Structures are given as structure tokens and as C-alpha cells.
Image: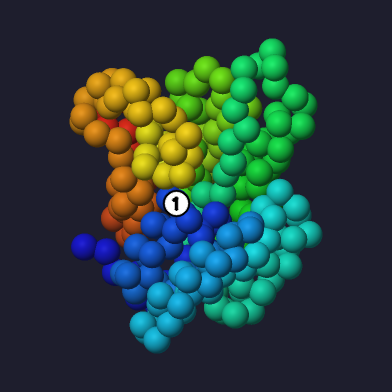
Amino acid sequence: MFDFTGKTAVVTGGSRGIGRAIAENFASHGANVAFIYGSSKGRAEELEAKYAGSGVQVKGYCADVSDIESIKAAAKQILSDFGKVDILVNNAGITKDGYMMLMSGDNWGKVIEVNLTGAFNVTKQFLTHFIGNRSGKIINMTSVGGIAGMAGQTNYSASKAGLIGFTKSLSKEVAGKNINVNAIAPGYILTEMLDTIPDKMKEKIIKDIPASRIGDVDDIANAAMFLASDCSGYINGQVLVVDGGLTA
């Protein structure tokens, strides 16, 4: 259904979890992929090696999305190495959970810097390129926490709600230039972030999900491929919720 041959995708937080699944799915469907990662050098090298000699270029770039100079350097190198970028997935994100009354200013600020300001920093570097080409797909990874809120995650939920506003506002600025800006809001997905949740709590979560299962990373990657494809040409400024019916 999806063919990204000749396209180049940039995926932040691409060495593991949802970001890695998105990077692999794009590469498996013909795209060249530049992925940005923060610290997982071993996993980044493993991902590069997986697609070596496959006919597509998959290359990792170590950078801090919350540091504008770090991202400027990475973006410049990506455009030099790949020549063009067609798709940007702002997936990089962190959690520093805690109840508001116990949350430090540092834990509040770092989550906002990475999850929200990071998306601004990265998008800023490629937006002129998209506008010049009069083409582009930007996908921001928000969360059901940004829609419904989550106790113990005021920082995370605020950052993800901010991404929804960012998505909707930017879409209005660039829609006339053939650039689509949309967001994906995952529910509970089987990633390392879920490993810290006790089994009894996971059982309760599953009972609350109409689909009766926790989502897989490929559920999110499939949504990303749809929003990055020509099939979504008339979809702009929207949030695609992928949560098994949890927030329906």
C-alpha cells in the first residue's frame, strides 16, 4: 500500500521504541532514513547495520533536540548527506513523572524542553527546505495524555498538549504550500516506558481498553506511514488517536 521509494524521512528519537519502529517501517517501504538519537549509540549502530546493503540509506545522527546548536549541526549534515528531506517525524520524548506538589522545576523544565521545544527546534531547521520544495509531511508524536491528561504527569501531559496546539497552528501557516502537519496520539504502547508499570496495573489498563490489548509499536508506525503518504494529502492539522478505543 505504501511506497516511499526516493523519499527521505527524518525521525527523532529513532534508535528505539516507537521511533525505531517508524524508521524501520519507512526503510522497509523504500525510504532513505536519517534518524536522530540522544544516547543509544549501540542501538543506533545496530539499526544502521540492519539496512546496510539493502538499497536504502539509513544513518543515525547523535544530537540533543533541546539544544538548538546541536540540532542545527545535525540538520545541516543530514541535508548534506541526503540532499533533501520529504518527511519529518518529531518523536523524541522523555518522561520525568511525579505528582505536581512533589515535582521539581528541573523535572518540569526538562520534559518541556525535550518534548515541546525539541519539536520546535527540529521543525525550524527543515521548514525552509519544505517551503522551498513546496512539499513536506510533518508528523508530531503527541499522546492521549495531551488530550485527557494523566495524574502524575503534569509536565508530560502539558508538553504533549502543547504539541497539539503547535501542530494545529503550524498547519494553518503552511497548508497553502503543500505541507501537511499532523499529529499522532498513542495510547498505551509496548515500549520501555511501560516496563516500569507493575503487572497488576497493566492488567487493569488492558481491562479499560476496548480492544483488550496494549498497542504495539507497529500500530503507531502504520499510522505514521499513512500520514506521510499521498493518501493523507487533504488531512491537515489533525490528531490521529491510536489507543484501541481508550479515549473514545
Count numbered badges in the picture.
Answer: 1
Q: Position of residue 135 (x, y in %)?
A: 48, 63
| Residue 120 visible in the picture | no
Q: Where is residue 13 drawn, in percent x and y?
A: 54, 54
* Quadrant of the rendered image containing residue 12: bottom right
- Where disc 1 sits, the SS reads helix
Residue for point 59% across, 36% down: 95
Asked if residue 94 is positioned above or below residue 47 in the image, the reply reads: above
Determine which residue is flagged by label 1: 17
Q: Is residue 117 left or right of residue 190?
A: right
Residue at image point 58% right, 60% down: 40
**Extreme front residue here?**
199
Mark 1 residue type: Gly
The way the protein has been coloured in the rendering is: rainbow
Q: Is residue 214 above or below residue 67?
A: above
Q: Position of residue 49 (x, y in %)?
A: 46, 77
Q: Quadrant of the N terminus?
A: bottom left
Image quadrant in which the C terminus is located: top left
Side of 237 relative to 159 (left or right): left
